[in-house]
Image (cartoon, rainbow, N blue to C red):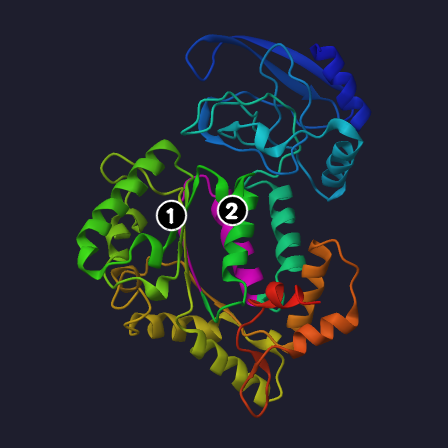
Amino acid sequence: MGPQEDVKQLRDVGFGKITLKAVEGKKSLWGTPAKVCCLVSSTGPGLAWEPPRCSQEPATSTLSLPSPPCPLGWDRLHTGSASLLRRGEAAQRVGYGGSPGGARGTQGTEPSGHPRLAHGSPEVGGGREGRWGLRLDTSPGSRAFCLALKLQLEEKLFGQHLATEVILKALTGFKNNKEPKKPLTLSLHGWAGTGKNFVSQIVAENLYAKGLKSNFVHLFVSTLHFPHEHQIKLYQDQLQGWIRGNVSACASSVFIFDEMDKLHPGIIDAIKPFLDYYEQVGGVSYRKAIFIFLSNAGGDLITQTALEFWRAGRSREDVQLHDLEHVLSVGVFNNKHSGLWRSRLIDRNLIDYFIPFLPLEYKHVKMCVRAEMRARGLAVDEDVVTKVAEEMTFYPKDEKIYSDKGCKTVQSRLSFY
C-alpha cells in the first residue's frame, strides 16, 4: 500500500483534499536518516514534523491505516465540533479502525498554529515498534480530548457535578500549558463507592490508550505496597527511586495513590521535592507529571455539608468547591488517619485541588444499576433496578438520604437477579 492509496482512503473517509510532501535529511527516533512524509490538506491545517518528545500511546479513537513506506502520522486535527470525532468513529466501524493497543506514537512539540505529527516509537520499557497511522487526535491538550473527557465524565459519573467540573478544568488546563511550573496534583476525597477510583480510571484511559495498564500509569495501593509501619524509610527511598526512574523515561507519567487514608504518616512526604516548583530535581524535570491521591478521609465532612444543604432545602448542585475545599484540606491535615496528616504537601500548598465526591442518593444508585446492566449487555429492567437500589442501606437512619456504600456493591448485588 503506497502513499497515494493511503490518501485515497483518507479522502473516502472525508478528510478533504490531501497532498503529500517529503522532507529529506531528518533523523528518526533511533538516529538514522529518515524520509518523513508530511501531510498538507487544503481543507485542514498544515502539518510540521518536530523531534519526538516522549513516547505516548494513541487515544482510543485512533484511526489507523495501513503502513506507508515512510513515517506517516497525524497527531492533531482542529476539531471545532464533534462532527470530526464522529466521522473518525464511523470510519472505524466500516473497517478502517486499528487496535488502540497496537500502536505507539511520540508527540512532537507544537509550533504555534501547527498541529503535531505523530512519530511512532517503541513503548517505554518495551521493544516493539508501533505502527504508523493517520489518526483523529484525542491526545492530551487537544479540543477533541477535552470533549471526550467531558462526555465520559458527564455520562458515566453520577451525582458528582463538582468532581466533573474541577477535574475537567484542571486536566485540560494543565495539558494545554506547554510550560507548567509544577506537576498537577489532585486529591480526591469521599465515601467509598462515590466514584474516586472510577474517575482515576477515566483519566488514565483518556491520557493513554491502555489506561491503568499503560507503562506510563503507575498505581500504588497503600495496604499492598506500603503495609509495614516499621519500614517507612525503605518505602520512602523506593518510592523516590520509582518515580525518578519513570519520569526520566517519560515526563508525562501518571502516578495514582489509592487508599491514602491507610497510608502511614510521613511516607507521602518523600515525594515533596517532585511536587514542588523546581525546574529540575537531580537533573530531572517533574513538571509534566500528574499525581492523583484517592482517600476516604474527609468523607464525613463532605457528607455533613451535603446534608446541611439538603436540610436547608437547597439542591446538591448548589454545593460549590469553595464550600468544601478549605474545610477538606484542614480536615485531612489534622486527621492522623488521612495519609496527609501534618503533611508538607498541604503545608506548602503543593496539592492543586482537593476534590470532594458527594455522597450518592437513591436516584444515583439506580443510575449505577442501569449503567451496569447496559455494560453487561442486558435490557434495563426497572423492576430489577428498583430491587437492587432498595437493598442498599442509607444514611442518616431517619432521613435515609445517602447510600453508605455508594455504588460499590451494585455489581455483586445485580448478579443475584
Neighbourhood count class around disc 1 (C-alpha, 10 Å): few under 14, some 14–19, many 20 upward: many
Q: Which residue is mark 2?
A: 204
Is residue 414 in view from this perspective?
yes
Which label sits on residue 183?
1
Name the image quarter holding residue 89: top right
Q: Residue furthest bottom?
A: 398
The amino acid pointed to by label 2 is: Ala
The percent position of residue 275, horizontal first and vertical second, equals 32, 50
The amino acid pointed to by label 1 is: Pro
183 in the magenta segment: yes
3D distance between C-alphas at marks 1 and 2: 16 Å
**Range shown magenta:** 162-188
Where, quadrant-wise, is the N terminus in this rendering? Answer: top right
Up-down relation of residue 387 to residue 41 (above or below): below
Where, quadrant-wise, is the C terminus in this rendering? Answer: bottom right
Up-down relation of residue 201 to residue 364 (above or below): above
In-image side of 411 versus 304 (left or right): right
Looking at the image, is mark 1 or mark 2 earlier in the sequence? 1
Up-down relation of residue 9 to residue 257 (above or below): above
